[in-house]
Amino acid sequence: RFKFTKINRELILLTPIPKEFISHPKLSIYVSVYNTDKFLPYFIRSFQNQNLTEWELLIVNDGSTDYSIKILNIFSKYDQRIKVINFEKNRGIAYAWSLEVEKALGEYLLSVDSDDYEANYDSLYSLYKTAKETGAEYVKSELAWAYDEIFYQHSNHFSDVPNQLIPIKNYPEDIIRSEYHKIEFNGLHNDVIYAPLIKKVFEEIIEDRKSGSAGMPRPI
């Protein structure tokens, strides 16, 4: 377990991160942030508390007008696994995701939302272990992701049900593409996908970004 202290009301990691965790992560977690500053400390700490520590967290601050970038800069200063890309203007989730997928170093990739936090400390380990042991390219998850009830007066998104993981081999690329384009882009959230597969799926989107034609509007 890592050691933390409080600085400017944020929990900051003090323990040095081994270099191999940074250069060869098992999981790359990628997220687009837009005006979710009140959730970010809980969101980031939920990953820092995981019992699988060989991860990188790729975060695009997509033109936020609140304190999101300040919070992200504080956390990334003290934890090199957290890698922040800042956009001065909002470019949309497709643009952000394509950049993160292109830069990801992990063996597997995981997409999440910045206003969630991981309720179970072993969720990353369970996802990774399932993928490795089964040889699955895609692990569909029903994890206990939760909105913090401090900010929401209900807890219907919270679950104490054990993780339900569905490993899938030879997952068709066209299905992943269709999942990606689902309304509000929730199709791929919380699922672990083998890096070469998801990078191949994103090839067209990455090329669109580089040519200047990418940039879907952020869902409201």
Image (cartoon, rainbow, N blue to C red):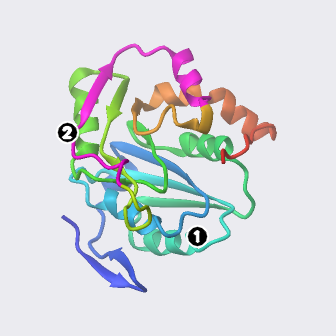
The residue that appears at 52% across and 50% down in the rendered structure is 31
Of the residues shown, which amino acid type is indicated by label 2?
Pro
What's drawn in magenta, residue-wise? 155-182
For this view, does 167 lie left or right of residue 60?
A: left
Q: In terms of secondary structure, where does tag 2 sit?
A: loop
The residue that appears at 28% across and 36% down in the rendered structure is 127
- Is residue 168 found inside the magenta-colored segment of the image? yes
In this view, the residue in front, 162 or 25, is 162
The residue that appears at 62% across and 45% down in the rendered structure is 99
The residue that appears at 34% across and 64% down in the rendered structure is 45
Q: Do the residues labelled 2 and 1 touch (CB within 8 Å)?
A: no
Q: In terms of secondary structure, where does tag 1 sit?
A: helix
- Category of crowding for the residue at label 2, using alpha-carbon neighbours closer than 10 angstroms: few (below 14), some (14–19), many (at least 20): few
In terms of sequence position, does the residue under pointer 2 or pointer 1 come before the other? 1
Of the residues shown, which amino acid type is indicated by label 1?
Ile
Q: Where is residue 150 in the image (x, y as percent from the top left)?
A: 38, 68
* Residue labelled with disc 1: 69
In this view, the residue in front, 5 or 141, is 141
Q: Position of residue 16 (x, y in %)?
A: 29, 70
* Residue labelled with disc 2: 162
